[in-house]
Image (cartoon, rainbow, N blue to C red):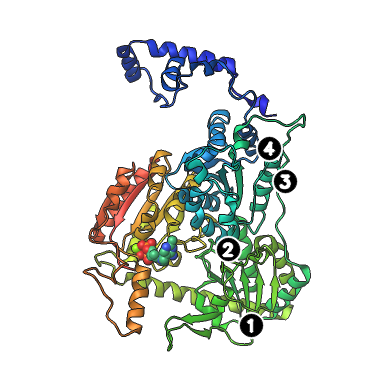
């Protein structure tokens, strides 16, 4: 199978070497002229070596006339396998432990499906894949050095795990202790590289044969893509990549990928849930990671309207239109008699409050709901059981629990709910809708008023930052790909988000450093889909791995990044300040505007210059609110032309 795709025969390759050799012999003046006038495409920096060059560099020119592999490399077959799954990109940082497959992806695979995208940090590769999936609905793979590379990647893998997003991580490893190169490659080898991320991946494997690889790669893809989604890892032995195919007469085959349908709620549990919802005086729906497509949004609207139930969107995804009159803030749980929680990260935190620094310096708990309130849960995360990391949050007893995927369960649930509503409840339900319309309009008014506070302040208020951005993108097919830091949730409070890609959700694990790479990855997906990408980019978030800016410019990924540059890790400013207050001490400032260790000022980082140095169009620092709109307008036109653009804006802390 692999053989049939081998693009260049050994003989043709050698002929190519001869031509290249002849070209080198041409006079340098002539070469210079033709390079400047006749050659629109830049010459690749790594041409195949001429015999002459090889002789000069290695002293063993004879090798060029001998076959050095004596067959088809194993990694070519691996590329054949990968190509059956339509994985469009592999954002990766290069490393010798996966050079076999790297070379096959670009030379044998033609650098398409997947296309190798150059990343400057492994965390950026995983973060890009994370953001890409939420915009495109398709997973990417990332290649990384099995030990040190994977060590860099881990936090991003954890974010993807907590956010229930599939990413296929392929780590190179030199397994054979007797044959691997001594020195650094040995230091960079491990018995089991996947152990680094096993606690927060859905599945991993270390194939020991090519047929094993084919099975495992398709299996990994299938597991990652079955809700609840999650990252998976494959460790690739470098020997398996580099050695030629030795299948002992056995024919290599590639298993067909057939998607697994997502788990649907049990019919008995659904009936009980429908009975409770239909009888409720004041049912409330809370959604966290429900919609993965337009269909998810549509289904949630249908359920909410059937019940005239208020909906709290916790913004793990864009689940429910913000323009809908049933869209309500988190506080409405307190009046509910039945709460339907859909794919909640934290059901306990939804129905309880926790206040930091109580009397004894530990948090104080209090219920936010009435004791008799019935709780129903549909959550596919119940099917992910790992013990070490605590992303499952506090234990919350519920009355009806379904270990099921919500988007897949909603069609049947809507049917049973409609059937369960008795005729004599219909008018009461309609009245509920009327009350909700009124409450929605009042809430909108209050939010607008709150946003106008400090409108002309300098540094710029977060509400103004968000609304000046909105004014420039509102007529485009926009997608808010990430909002790092904290801008007091103004986008979801004020932008008329309606489509599932109007907001892609947060990091999942709150590992800071997600915003920059995820927004570049999502912008890549949106570029291919013809959507305009905008991100709110926090300063702290950008400084973990800013090299992803270069990747965006290098691969022509249009993205408007409007910075929420509050010159600090403001979340932590507040933590240290709060604890100092609790201990009756004055926070030690060290000539900064916040407690020592929490500010990013003195010197102030010139993010516009940072971005510019990596190929972005950039402007800043903008401190005067009157200058913000025109600057964003200019940036929008740059982004529309296909380039990334950044506006460095000095903002209020929150
Ligand atoms: C990898 C990582 N390191 C540290 C933290 C702790 N932390 C939580 S919020 C925060 C500040 C982030 O700063 P920025 O992105 O600028 O957002 P801001 O709070 O200033 O709006 C930090 C350091 C974390 N969550 N993740
Ligand atoms: Mg900040």
Question: Residue 151 in the image: x percent, y percent?
Answer: 49, 53
Residue 480 in sight here: yes
Residue beneath label 2, please? 289
- Element marked by disc 4: helix
Q: Gap in Å between the C-alphas at discs 4 and 2?
A: 37 Å
- Element marked by disc 1: loop
Q: Between tags 3 and 2, which lies in front?
A: 3
Residue beneath label 3, please? 258
Q: On the picture, is 581 further left or further right than 328?
A: left
539, above or below 446, in the image: above
Q: Between tags 4 and 2, which lies in front?
A: 4
Q: On the picture, is 235 further left or further right than 322?
A: right
Q: Gap in Å between the C-alphas at discs 4 and 1?
A: 60 Å
Residue 67 falls in which quadrant of the image? top right
122, above or below 333, in the image: above
How would you rate the neighbour count of disc 4 (Cα within 10 Å): few for under 14, some for 14-19, many for 20 or more?
A: many
Q: Where, quadrant-wise, is the C terminus in this rendering?
A: bottom left
Residue at x 43%, y 10% (from the top left corner): 22
Q: How many labels, in total? A: 4
Q: Between tags 4 and 1, which lies in front?
A: 4
Q: Are marks 4 and 1 in contact (CB under 8 Å)?
A: no
438, above or below 149, in the image: below
Question: Residue 37 in the image: x percent, y percent?
Answer: 33, 18
Q: Residue 281, which numbered label?
A: 1
Q: Residue 210, which numbered label?
A: 4
Q: Earlier in the sequence, mark 1 or mark 3?
A: 3
Mark 1 CB lies closer than 8 A to ligand 1: no
Nearer the observer, 336 or 422: 336
Residue 490 in sight here: no
Q: Are marks 4 and 3 in contact (CB under 8 Å)?
A: no
């Amino acid at each position: 199978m692999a053989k049939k795709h081998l693009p260049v025969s050994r003989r043709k390759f050698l002929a190519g070497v001869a031509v290249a050799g002849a070209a080198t012999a041409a006079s340098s003046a002539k070469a210079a002229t033709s390079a400047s006038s006749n050659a629109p495409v830049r010459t690749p920096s790594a041409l195949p070596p001429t015999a002459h060059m090889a002789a000069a560099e290695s002293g063993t020119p004879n090798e060029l006339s001998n076959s050095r592999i004596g067959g088809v490399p194993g990694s070519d077959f691996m590329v054949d396998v990968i190509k059956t799954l339509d994985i469009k990109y592999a954002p990766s940082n290069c490393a010798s432990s996966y050079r076999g497959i790297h070379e096959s992806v670009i030379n044998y695979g033609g650098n398409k499906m997947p296309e190798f995208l150059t990343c400057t940090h492994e965390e950026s590769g995983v973060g890009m894949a994370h953001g890409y999936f939420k915009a495109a609905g398709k997973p990417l793979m990332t290649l990384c050095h099995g030990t040190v590379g994977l060590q860099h990647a881990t936090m991003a893998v954890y974010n993807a795990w907590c956010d229930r997003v599939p990413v296929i991580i392929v780590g190179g490893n030199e397994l054979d202790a007797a044959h691997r190169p001594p020195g650094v490659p040995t230091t960079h080898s491990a018995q089991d590289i996947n152990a680094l991320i096993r606690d927060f991946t859905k599945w991993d494997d270390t194939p020991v044969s090519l047929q094993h690889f084919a099975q495992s790669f398709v299996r990994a893809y299938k597991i990652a893509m079955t809700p609840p989604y999650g990252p998976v890892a494959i460790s690739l032995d470098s020997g398996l990549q580099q050695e030629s195919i030795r299948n002992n007469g056995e024919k290599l085959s590639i298993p067909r990928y057939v998607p697994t349908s997502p788990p649907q709620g049990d019919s008995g549990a659904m009936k009980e849930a429908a009975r409770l919802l239909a009888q409720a005086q004041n049912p409330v729906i809370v959604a966290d990671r429900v919609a993965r497509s337009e269909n998810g949004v549509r289904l949630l609207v249908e359920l909410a309207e059937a019940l005239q139930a208020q909906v709290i969107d916790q913004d793990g995804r864009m689940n429910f239109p913000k323009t809908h009159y049933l869209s309500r803030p988190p506080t409405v749980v307190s009046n509910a008699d039945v709460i339907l929680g859909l794919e909640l990260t934290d059901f306990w935190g939804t129905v309880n409050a926790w206040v930091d620094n109580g009397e004894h310096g530990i948090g104080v708990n209090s219920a936010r709901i009435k004791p008799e309130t019935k709780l129903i849960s549909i959550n596919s995360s119940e099917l992910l059981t790992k013990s070490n990391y605590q992303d499952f949050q506090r234990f919350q007893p519920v009355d009806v629990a379904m270990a099921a995927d919500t988007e897949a369960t909603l069609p049947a649930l809507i049917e049973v709910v409609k059937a369960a509503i008795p005729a004599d409840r219909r008018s009461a339900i309609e009245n509920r809708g009327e009350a909700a319309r009124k409450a929605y309009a009042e809430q909108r008014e209050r939010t607008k008023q709150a946003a106008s506070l400090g409108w002309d302040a300098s540094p710029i208020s977060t509400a103004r930052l968000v609304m000046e951005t909105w004014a420039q993108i509102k007529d485009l097919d926009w997608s808010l790909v990430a909002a790092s830091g904290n801008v007091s949730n103004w986008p979801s409070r004020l932008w008329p988000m309606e489509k599932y890609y109007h907001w892609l959700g947060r990091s999942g694990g709150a590992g800071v450093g997600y915003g920059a790479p995820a927004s570049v990855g999502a912008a890549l997906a949106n570029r291919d889909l013809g959507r305009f990408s905008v991100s709110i980019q926090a300063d702290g978030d950008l400084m973990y791995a800013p090299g992803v800016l270069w990747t965006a410019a290098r691969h022509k990924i249009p993205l408007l990044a409007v910075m929420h540059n509050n010159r600090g890790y403001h979340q932590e400013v507040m933590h240290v300040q709060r604890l100092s207050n609790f201990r009756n001490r004055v926070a030690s400032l060290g000539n900064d505007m916040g407690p020592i260790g929490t500010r990013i000022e003195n010197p102030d980082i010139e993010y516009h210059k940072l971005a510019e140095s990596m190929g972005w169009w950039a402007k800043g620092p903008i401190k005067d609110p009157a200058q913000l709109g025109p600057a964003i307008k200019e940036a929008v036109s740059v982004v529309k032309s296909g380039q990334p653009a950044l506006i460095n804006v000095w903002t209020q802390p929150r």
